[in-house]
Every structure is written in structure tokens, then in C-alpha cells.
């Protein structure tokens, strides 16, 4: 059984006590050794520091691949050369007899040279916490600098004297010790700036080591004999300094190689473990063996959240068999295993099933790794269900948009508004999920329903242009939509089963309204697509109306508004065809204004135009809706009356009566206006052409005239 004292001294809690006892014993032993044989004391102290310096290099160099920065390797290279200078200093010390011709001055010069090299190195070293070190250049630089300095002592003899026997230290030596102390203070300051890069204990050991070196330098500023008390104390401080460096670097590097001297190495392990646990993507470590391929060895917290299983439940499950929907992904086991065995990374999409049965999509990246000494796979699974759903929705919306734009060709083929409205209802049924939709058109200050998804629109009300939801949308020129139409006072939805609604202006021509029985069913995409539909509808209505207006202008006489001769010629062939098909008669009434030239000559052409317009109105007001009144030329008019025979005689009589009434009521002329009228009839059985019938009417008119 271990003693209580032994337990106290060997426990980590009492490590500082152990080191303190050892340091006291080492100092006491060194002191008593110096009283017995100072040269032996000096040699042992220097040998200890040299061994420590070389060991620092050995540890730094052989652990360089584990470092997160190049501080330690620079530190090690520097102390390799510092140890070499100190070795020469030890051999040159008075009494060693290695360099008898140089005397005590040589050892002191080498001491100053070694301390300059050490202090400057300690000042520069913290720079390599953040910068990369070129090892070859570092070795070359130290080698070149050391060679030049040693040549300045041994060959050229230009290095300043540092010790004169009988009088002691030179001014150069004393000033150098103060300069070196100042450089070392700078080294402590820079080291403190990067203290977060070091283990806490390592930082304090290094900082204290440099501080002891400063104390040593100060004691080396006023000794007279190389065997004097000041020299003794200075070497004791150096002994302590290198002992602390040993504790900071060598002891740590040998006894705890996984962290060496750097805090980053321990922090990295904790950081990577933290990354593993806190990464938003699910991570599975999987067995790579053929028999257990896909067996889960370890998972992170996100894997628990993603799958719904606990870590304990997942451990031992097979990811492919237990979590993947429908088995393995498209890549076969052989293909994946072959790639992973070659060290390649494999990626694919995979659909999985959670513990509660919900299905979800993952983007998977699998990389071969080593786990607890065995080959394994690291499978990173990112939940992309929302992205896949968004992609699916996007594809649906693209298809809807494609159908909507394809409908434009259909709209453009419509020749009148009614055809356009019917086509619009069919398109909405194919593209949208409306339970009802209505098209309102603005006519004479009101919004009139012209088309609906319902078969009968006769029960649909019309609105003033600023009345109800349709009027509000039309007057504001804005799309109005919402989740529940019952919340809209303007809509007046009493007793309605409708919920979701939208009211989209068709430019300044009308309003497109749609509704659904389901609450909140319309999305922003639905609104945007409906606005596109309304935009196409607006353009096509304008097109149809413009075409109709242009056609009206081409078919009508600009002065009287009656059809012109071109239109009559086009229509005549259609009526002849109908007459031939059904055996109906066509009557032609040809008339002109008697004394019309006199009207122009006596009253001006402006009055003549007014007379023509008055006669045109009189004719238009006294014919049937199916009859066609034509300004045939000049003051000559033609009335074509399909499906009539004896009625044409009555028509001629009535026109004469109407012109008589006009004469009584008009003061435009001071003589009565009369009409010359000629009548003819045509049917397919007459054996003559329709042109001959027209000529007959014209001749009869002139006979009457």
C-alpha cells in the first residue's frame, strides 16, 4: 500500500510541491558542489542547460507535424544553436584547458554571444504563433550568423573584450547584459500577448524561465572573478531557468505528447468534438465491413433530432436497412464500396423515414475514415426536405406558367370577346384550383358579369364601378386577396360557403374575381399567375376591340355611319348562299334623294351632308334588325331585306310617309324633300342572277325619279 505522503506527492494536485522540492534540492546540491569544486559545478550546470537545449530541439523537430503553429519549432532551432554556443563556452571556461591561449576572456565572449542569440530568439519566437516558418531558411540563417560571430572571436579577433583578468568585466560586457535583459523583457511582453495560444502552466513556466534569465544577466554585470559569488548566483539562476524550460517543453512533450506544449492541440480535440456534436447536419459513423455494411457505430446530436431516434436506439441499427426508404440509393453497394475503398468520397440524394413514419429527403456525403483503429465511413446527411418540396412546387408552378403562356395563342385566335371569355374560363379550370371565378367588364359606369365558371350568369349581380369588392379593386386598380371573404365587409358574403378570395383588375377594362371554399388556400404564386392571366386578358380585349373598331371603320360610311358598298358586296354573297340553301327571297330597295343637286347648289354642301345624315337615320330607324342599309353612292341608298317578299312594298310606303313627316317637322329646307324608290325581288328559282335583280331595282328607281 502506498503511503499517504507518496499519494500527496505524486497526485497532479501536488505537482507544484514536487517541483518546488526538486528545485530546492537541485539548488542546494549545486551550491554545495560549487564549494567543493567550482569548475565541476560550472561544467555540470552548463552541461544540464546544453542537454536541455538539444532536447528542446529534438522534441520540437520530431513533433512539428502536430503543431498548429511554428512557435515551438523556431524555439527548438534557436536553442540548438544556443546549446552549441554554450558548449563552446563550457569548454573555454578557465581551468578546462581546451583553449589555453585565449584565457578567461574567451569564455565570457562566448557567454555574451550565446545570451544575445538566446534573447533575440525569445523576442522573435512569438511571431511564429501566427506566421509560417521556413525551416531551411531558419537553419541557414542561424548557421550563417553563428559562423560569422564565432569567426569574429576565433579567427578575426574583432569581437569586443568582455573580461580583463585583474580588473574584471569590461564596459561592453556590462552594457550587453543590460541590453540582453531589455530584449528578454520584450520577449516576455510578446509571449504574454499570445498567452491564449499556450497551456496556462506552460506560459507561466516559460515566462518565469525568461525572468530568471534576466536575474542571471543582472548578476553577471558585476563579478570580478569567474569563480566569484556573483558568477555563482548567475549560474544558479541559469540552472533554474533551464529547469523551467525543461518542465514547460520537454516534460510536457514526453509525458503528455498528445498535447505537447500548445493549448491549441487540446482545444482542437474539444473543438472538433464540439463541431461533431453541434453540426446542423446529421453525422453517422458507419461500419465499412461487408457483413456489417451500414451498421451505425456513432452519431451526433443532429442525427437524433433528424431521425427522431435516441443515440442509444441508433447505435447498432443499420442506416440503409432501417432508415432509408425503399432500400439503398441508386448507387449500388459494389459501386459505393469500390469508390470508398479507393479513398474517394461518394455523394447522392436519399429518401429516409423518421421514427414517427414521416418521410424526408437528405443530401448525403460519405467519406472513408479511421474510427477506433478500424476502417469506417463518415456519412454526413443534410435534411433537404424543404428544398425538395420547394423544387417540386417550383416544377408545378413552371408547368402552370407554361400552360398559362400557351393559352396566349388560344386567346389570340379569338375573334370576339365572348369567345375570349369562354376560353379564359377553360384556361382557369386547367391551371387554377378555383371553386368559382367571374369576369366583370366595365360598361357605362357599371361592372357587368360577362363570364363565369358557373353555367348560368343571369343570377350574378352587376355593380357600380366603385361598389362591392369588385368595384373596390377596379377603382383602386389593385389586387385584393385574403384568407376568408367573410372578413371583408365590401364583399357582402352572407350565407356564402366561399372563403379564400381574390379580385384582380383587368387593367381599366374590368375585374377578374376568384374564390375557393377552403380558407387560406391562395398563395402569392397563385396571385402572381392570376395577375399574369388578367394582363393577357386585358391585352386581348383591347386587341379584339381595336380590330372591331378598325373593321367598323372599313365597313361603314364615315358621313352617315351606314354600311358601305364594300361591306354590302361581302354580305351579299353570304345572303345569296343562305337563300339558295333555304329557298328564301331577298328584296332590294334602291332609293335616292330627289333634287339633291339643288340642295347642294342652293344651301351648300354642308347642308347637303346634313340632309344625307337625316335620311340615313330615317332609313335605319324604319328597317328590321336583319335588314342591311347601305350608302350605295352619292345620294343613293340601298336596303337589302333577307327573307322578305310583300313586306318590301309596305317598307316603300312607310318610308314615303316618314319622309313626309320629316318635311313637316324640319326647317332645314324651304321645299319638300322626296325619295325615288325602286324595288325588286330575287330567289334561286328565278333563273336570273342577283346582279340583274339589283339592276332592276335601280332602273325602277330612275323610272320613278
Image (tube, rainbow, N blue to C red):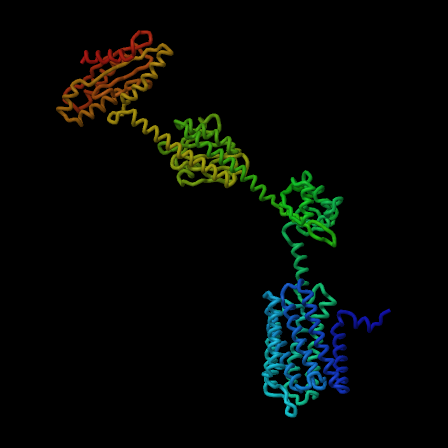
Outermost residue toward the bottom in this view: 166
* Residue closest to the eye, 482 or 64: 64
187 vs 416: above or below? below
Left or right: residue 417 versus residue 45 is: left
Outermost residue toward the right in this view: 1
Left or right: residue 614 versus residue 178 is: left
Left or right: residue 622 versus residue 421 is: left
Q: Percent x, y for residue 11?
A: 78, 69
412 vs 274: above or below? above
297 vs 482: above or below? below
Residue drawn 17% across and 20% down?
596
Is residue 495 visible to us here? no
396 vs 258: above or below? above
- The answer to which quarter of the image holds residue 180 is bottom right
Q: Quadrant of the C terminus?
A: top left
Q: Percent x, y for residue 435?
A: 52, 32
Q: Percent x, y for residue 521?
A: 54, 38
- The answer to which quarter of the image holds residue 633 is top left
Residue drawn 72% across and 53% down?
371
- The answer to which quarter of the image holds residue 152 is bottom right
Q: Percent x, y for residue 558?
A: 25, 27
Q: Quadrant of the N terminus?
A: bottom right
Amino acid at each position: 500500500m502506498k503511503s499517504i505522503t507518496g499519494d500527496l506527492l505524486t497526485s497532479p494536485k501536488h505537482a507544484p510541491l514536487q517541483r518546488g522540492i526538486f528545485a530546492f534540492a537541485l539548488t542546494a546540491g549545486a551550491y554545495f558542489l560549487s564549494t567543493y569544486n567550482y569548475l565541476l559545478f560550472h561544467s555540470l550546470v552548463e552541461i544540464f542547460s546544453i542537454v536541455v537545449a538539444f532536447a528542446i530541439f529534438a522534441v520540437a523537430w520530431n513533433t512539428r507535424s502536430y503543431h498548429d503553429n511554428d512557435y515551438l519549432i523556431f524555439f527548438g532551432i534557436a536553442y540548438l544553436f544556443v546549446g552549441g554556443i554554450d558548449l563552446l563556452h563550457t569548454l573555454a571556461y578557465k581551468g578546462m584547458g581546451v583553449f589555453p591561449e585565449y584565457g578567461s576572456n574567451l569564455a565570457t565572449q562566448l557567454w555574451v554571444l550565446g545570451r544575445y542569440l538566446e534573447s533575440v530568439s525569445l523576442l522573435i519566437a512569438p511571431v511564429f504563433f501566427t506566421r509560417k516558418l521556413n525551416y531551411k531558411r531558419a537553419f541557414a540563417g542561424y548557421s550563417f550568423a553563428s559562423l560569422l560571430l564565432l569567426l569574429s572571436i576565433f579567427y578575426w579577433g574583432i569581437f569586443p573584450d568582455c573580461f580583463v583578468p585583474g580588473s574584471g568585466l569590461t564596459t561592453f560586457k556590462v552594457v550587453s547584459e543590460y541590453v540582453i535583459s531589455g530584449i528578454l523583457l520584450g520577449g516576455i511582453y510578446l509571449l504574454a500577448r499570445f498567452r491564449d495560444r499556450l497551456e496556462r502552466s506552460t506560459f507561466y513556466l516559460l515566462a518565469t524561465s525568461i525572468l530568471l534569465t534576466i536575474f542571471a544577466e543582472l548578476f553577471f554585470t558585476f563579478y570580478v572573478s569567474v569563480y566569484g559569488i556573483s558568477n555563482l548566483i548567475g549560474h544558479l539562476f541559469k540552472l533554474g531557468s533551464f529547469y523551467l524550460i525543461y518542465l514547460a517543453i520537454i516534460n510536457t512533450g514526453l509525458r503528455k505528447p498528445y498535447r505537447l506544449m500548445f493549448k491549441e492541440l487540446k482545444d482542437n480535440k474539444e473543438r472538433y468534438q464540439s463541431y461533431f456534436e453541434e453540426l446542423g447536419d446529421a453525422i453517422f459513423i458507419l461500419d465499412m465491413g461487408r457483413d456489417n455494411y451500414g451498421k451505425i457505430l456513432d452519431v451526433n446530436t443532429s442525427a437524433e433530432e433528424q431521425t427522431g431516434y435516441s443515440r442509444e436506439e441508433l447505435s447498432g441499427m443499420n442506416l440503409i436497412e432501417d432508415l432509408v426508404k425503399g432500400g439503398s440509393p441508386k448507387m449500388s453497394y459494389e459501386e459505393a464500396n469500390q469508390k470508398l475503398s479507393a479513398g474517394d468520397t461518394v455523394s447522392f440524394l436519399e429518401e429516409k423515414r423518421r421514427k414517427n413514419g414521416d418521410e424526408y429527403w437528405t443530401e448525403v456525403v460519405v467519406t472513408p475514415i479511421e474510427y477506433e483503429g478500424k476502417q469506417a465511413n463518415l456519412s454526413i446527411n443534410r435534411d433537404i426536405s424543404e428544398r425538395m418540396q420547394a423544387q417540386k412546387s417550383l416544377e408545378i408552378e413552371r408547368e402552370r406558367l407554361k400552360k398559362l403562356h400557351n393559352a396566349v395563342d388560344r386567346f389570340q385566335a379569338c375573334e370576339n370577346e365572348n369567345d375570349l371569355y369562354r376560353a379564359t374560363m377553360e384556361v382557369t379550370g386547367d391551371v387554377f384550383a378555383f371553386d368559382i371565378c367571374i369576369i366583370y367588364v366595365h360598361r357605362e359606369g357599371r361592372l357587368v358579369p360577362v363570364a363565369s365558371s358557373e353555367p348560368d350568369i343571369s343570377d350574378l349581380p352587376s355593380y357600380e364601378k366603385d361598389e362591392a369588392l369588385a368595384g373596390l379593386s377596379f377603382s383602386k386598380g389593385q389586387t385584393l386577396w385574403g384568407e376568408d371573404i367573410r372578413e371583408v365587409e365590401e364583399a357582402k358574403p352572407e350565407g356564402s360557403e366561399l372563403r379564400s378570395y381574390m379580385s384582380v383588375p383587368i387593367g381599366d377594362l374590368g375585374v377578374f374575381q376568384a374564390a375557393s371554399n377552403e380558407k387560406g388556400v391562395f398563395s402569392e404564386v397563385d396571385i402572381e399567375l392570376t395577375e399574369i392571366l388578367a394582363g393577357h386578358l386585358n391585352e386581348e380585349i383591347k386587341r379584339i376591340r381595336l380590330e372591331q373598331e378598325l373593321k367598323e371603320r372599313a365597313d361603314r360610311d364615315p358621313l352617315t355611319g351606314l354600311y358601305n358598298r364594300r361591306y354590302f358586296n361581302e354580305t351579299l354573297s353570304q345572303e345569296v348562299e343562305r337563300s339558295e340553301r333555304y329557298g328564301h327571297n331577298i328584296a332590294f330597295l334602291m332609293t335616292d334623294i330627289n333634287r339633291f343637286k339643288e340642295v347642294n347648289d342652293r344651301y351648300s354642301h354642308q347642308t347637303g351632308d346634313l340632309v344625307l345624315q337625316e335620311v340615313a337615320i330615317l332609313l335605319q330607324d324604319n328597317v328590321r334588325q336583319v335588314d342591311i342599309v347601305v350608302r350605295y353612292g352619292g345620294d343613293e341608298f340601298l336596303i337589302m331585306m333577307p327573307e322578305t317578299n310583300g313586306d318590301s312594298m309596305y317598307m316603300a310606303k312607310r318610308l314615303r310617309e316618314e319622309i313626309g313627316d320629316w318635311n313637316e317637322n324640319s326647317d332645314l329646307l324651304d321645299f319638300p324633300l322626296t325619295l325615288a324608290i325602286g324595288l325588286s325581288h330575287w330567289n334561286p328559282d328565278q333563273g336570273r342572277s342577283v346582279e340583274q335583280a339589283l339592276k332592276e331595282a335601280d332602273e325602277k328607281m330612275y323610272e320613278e325619279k
